[in-house]
Amino acid sequence: MSETPARPPADEAPLPTDEEILQRFLRSKNQPTGSRTLGFQILSVCQETKSVEVAFEARAELLANPMKQVQGGYLCAMLDECMSVACMVASGMTSVAPTAEMKTSFFRPAMPGRLRGVGRVVRWGRTLAFTEGELYDEAGRLVAKATGTAVPTPFKSYK
């Protein structure tokens, strides 16, 4: 697979800076319902490394299983969010990247509260993007890790 740059053609507007992208996320009034449910908050973006750092507020009343831990499916959704947002950033906010497949490994239970996520694009190709994501608990311990394959899909504008 040939690597293609995550850049628009020269006749299009220049790409936004990392700070501009971060501010767009922070000002967004149209955050998806799933993101709100997970307590998603973007902390930083880096187009150069194709990565993002995010936080989730895992509320016990919504996300806990009978053992009072965050249910694994929600952890998968958080990891998917990390990796998907990294894809948007890697594209210069010109594409979304629906997940085609994802593998998750769980290392320890996640308790309700704040979780930190890191998402990155390992390789951005013409038809596929390969991604990684990690979730850390409040003590900085790795809770879960995922790898994924996504399908870059251009969109007209991000507001």
Image (cartoon, rainbow, N blue to C red):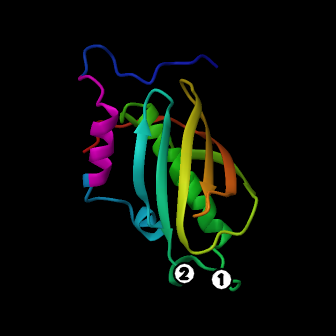
Whether residue 98 is visible: no
Quarter of the rendering occupied by the C terminus: top left
User: Where's residue 63, x and y in %?
Assistant: 56, 76
- Label 1: how many residues lie within 10 Å, few (<14), some (14-19) or many (20+)? some
User: Where's residue 10, x and y in %?
Assistant: 29, 13
Residue at 69% from the left image edge and 86% from the top image edge:
66
Q: Is residue 76 left or right of residue 20?
A: right
Q: Nearer the viewer, residue 19 or 149?
A: 19
Q: Main secondary structure of the magenta part?
A: helix
Whether residue 13 is visible: yes
Q: Which residues are magenta?
A: 13-26
Residue 60 circle label: 2
- Label 2: how many residues lie within 10 Å, few (<14), some (14-19) or many (20+)? some
Q: Secondary structure at mark 1?
A: loop
The amino acid sitting under disc 2 is Ala
Is 15 one of the magenta-colored residues? yes
- Distance from Cα at disc 2 to Cα at disc 1: 7 Å
